[in-house]
Amino acid sequence: MSKHNFTVILNHESLEIEDIQPSPPAKLRKNIDKIRHSLRPGQKQMADWESGLLAVSAVPGAGKSTGIAAAAAIAIARQYQYSLTTGNNYRRQLVVVTFTRSAAANLKLKIRDKLKQLSLPQTGFAVYTLHGLALNIANRHPDLSGLQLENVTLITPNQTHRFIRTAVEQWITKHPELYRRLLEGQKFDGEETEKLRRQSVLRTEILPDLAYTVIHEAKSSGILPEKLYKWSEKTQDTYQILQVAAGLYEQYQKLMACQDFIDYDDMILAALRVLENSSARRIEQNQIFAIFEDEAQDSSPLQTQLLEILAREEDGNNADKSTLNLVRVGDPNQAINSTFTPGDPIYFREFCKSCDINQRLATMNQAGRSSKIIIDAANFALEWVNSQWSTISNNEQTPFLSQKIAAVNMGDPQPNANPAPFGKGLELYSPRDIHHTVELLSQRVIELFTQNPDSRAAVLVRENRQGRWLTSALEAIYQEHQIKLYDVGEMERRSHVPQEILSLLQFCDRPHSPDYLKATLQVLVQRQLIPTQDINSLASIPEEFLYPGPLATPQTEIVQKAAHLCRSLLHARLELPIYQIIPFLALTLNYDQAELATADKLAERVNLQNWSNNSMGSMLSALSEIVNSERFEPVDTENSEEQYTKKGQLTIITMHKAKGLDWDYVFLPFLHENLIPGKFWVPPQSQFLGDFTLSEVARTQIRAGLHQQTETIPSVSQAWEQAKYLKVAEEYRLLYVAMTRAKRLLWISAAYQAPFTWSKPDNLQASAPCPVFTALKREFSKYID
């Protein structure tokens, strides 16, 4: 699960029987039946769950969140029925765990709506992201968890974080021989310039990347450095990659412990430490009657372990007998995060297999989202990739589970199922180049919105750079035709929030600094709070700009406005408590809802970090650390899905971000082989080590150890080959996710001429199409335009 999306819910929504007027049993049963009859077969299987384990394998568009919400509400209703029958004041709750804040907010609203339909109080459940759940447990038992939140600092480490950099430097000092071997690489003549170059690459790129990857992979799977050291003894590669990785991990852990820092994985580990205590475990388990997990295909072993402990219901008469009240819902065919998170579809596949043996597997294979031709195209892509897999990979596990999407039955209870296609429903194009692609795409979008102004449409791109280029190419055309263009990548690059807040705070701290004043004026201009003007001249003499004397040249109206706004910032600095400064600045900058939420998250983070020293200096230091060393993740607001899928709007969004969403018309341009499935690329500066990267080799070796596929750890060459296959498989799943976002029209293109890299979009060259696109053209030749 994402490490950057966690929700803290300190006030539990508990079930208070004495405070409510429950529905009469007969009416409640009737309402339950009404909801149940509104569900499809697979959703009904989930709604019929009463206890024990249940795996739910759901295809794209099957109504997973609708099924979870209905099943959750019915499960809560059954607890009411039990309470009414037995007279018990039942206080246990259902816990629903999902992937992101926005998904949690969406599920919470849907469950409340279903409870309203049942005429029940909208309580008895809590929806968390997994890290939010873990933090609550750790926070309730600080003595057991070891987390004293007022004394620790939460960080989001990446390759450039100072702890990672420091761990690398300390490891180099302690292991000169291993470092020297890396420095020598495959060939080295001792030339000083080359030595300095390699040292720089190792210290700033290769080793930080290895450290980050291994720490993230191992820690999220409950693997400590000691285990990595043992696994390293099973390998015999020249560089001793796993031993190097274990050493970097070990140094990182020591740094964290010494300075009272924690990361997101420490939250899970802290919660598990709490649950090792039998008394605390009983307390936590007694608050929960069941756990429903959404997006289970993205879970790591550590996360699954936490949920299984909480979902276990002990038998008071038999200590060895217990029941796992756990429903896990997911789709291994939509696992698109495993190449950069510890989640791996293999775990959910195995769970589904074990549940199937015990007849505890529900299959949601009917999907009402898309037209039949789109379903046929997606199913064909899935089957084609699986059929080709044996020719390119020695891995027996195919990228997809053989689970085809089926259209819904006649008389489906849910409205607008399998809508009629628009035009042919599937359109395949091979433009001359990417500029021709823009022409064709623009023509089609204008036609669609002219005929159906309230339609929803999206262009799904593989990477943000494509989205930025496409936005600039389309902007003028769509302004002319009054079509709203929404670039999610641009709107959500909210890493600007920490930088903007830092710029204003630095100015408030040192208003006479020309650099800080200039940075603040730049922010105000960018936010359109003051008109564009010559800010260099204004910032050159700060005193004269801010507080002009009687002999100063009279300021123009636009300069007066800028000076007034800057002075208001300085007044706020003097008048407001330090902890209110960041929220005030966010309001001053006229942030939208998502930006305000991000600023609140930033303020909470800074205030927590400076608990014992809440001063301007400590705030500036903390903010500087975030801006310079971390990717501060923005907040997904509750209405983000609505923003992405508005009527009359063309949304430009990445394939990853599009998961869970759908549109009437979906465009997939630039479908080229170098991006999907793509291949691992070894940067030229790193090739002195060989034709592989240390981080991916280590990741694959760790996963082999975790999955216990063999008694030995794969060699470097074997691990690199396996890593390449994992990437190819995931890229094909990503394409499958993108194709299944479309309801009425799926438009796909692969131009003959395209950039090798989208950082240089003007350098066009002959580009091979994605193999799936070529296969689609053969199979669906009638749909080629």
Image (tube, rainbow, N blue to C red):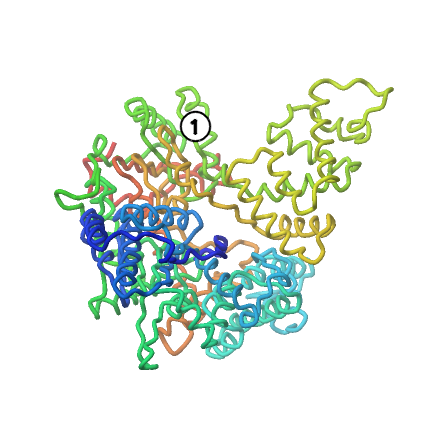
Q: Which residue is mark 1?
A: 474
Query: In screen coordinates, is 594 left or right of 404?
Result: right
Question: Residue shown at 19%/41% (left/top)?
Answer: 372
Relative height, residue 631 to residue 453 (above, below): below
Counting from the top left corner in percent of width and height, residue 11 is at 48, 56
In terms of image quadrants, where is residue 55?
Answer: bottom left
Q: x%, y% of residue 691?
A: 48, 61
Foreground pick, 93 / 712:
93
Where on the picture, by quarter, is residue 190?
bottom right
Residue 694 visible in image: no
Residue nearest the viewer, comparing 465 with 163:
163
Residue extending farthest left: 410
Residue 591, quarter of the rendered image: top right
x and y percent of residue 714 in the render? 41, 72
Q: What secondary structure is marked by label 1?
A: helix
Q: Residue at x 61, y 44 (%)?
A: 498
Type of amino acid at the residue the image marks with label 1? Leu
Relative to 41, 564 lies left or right: right
- Quarter containing the C terminus: top left
Residue 191 or 411: which is nearer the viewer?
411
Residue 189 relative to residue 506: left or right: left
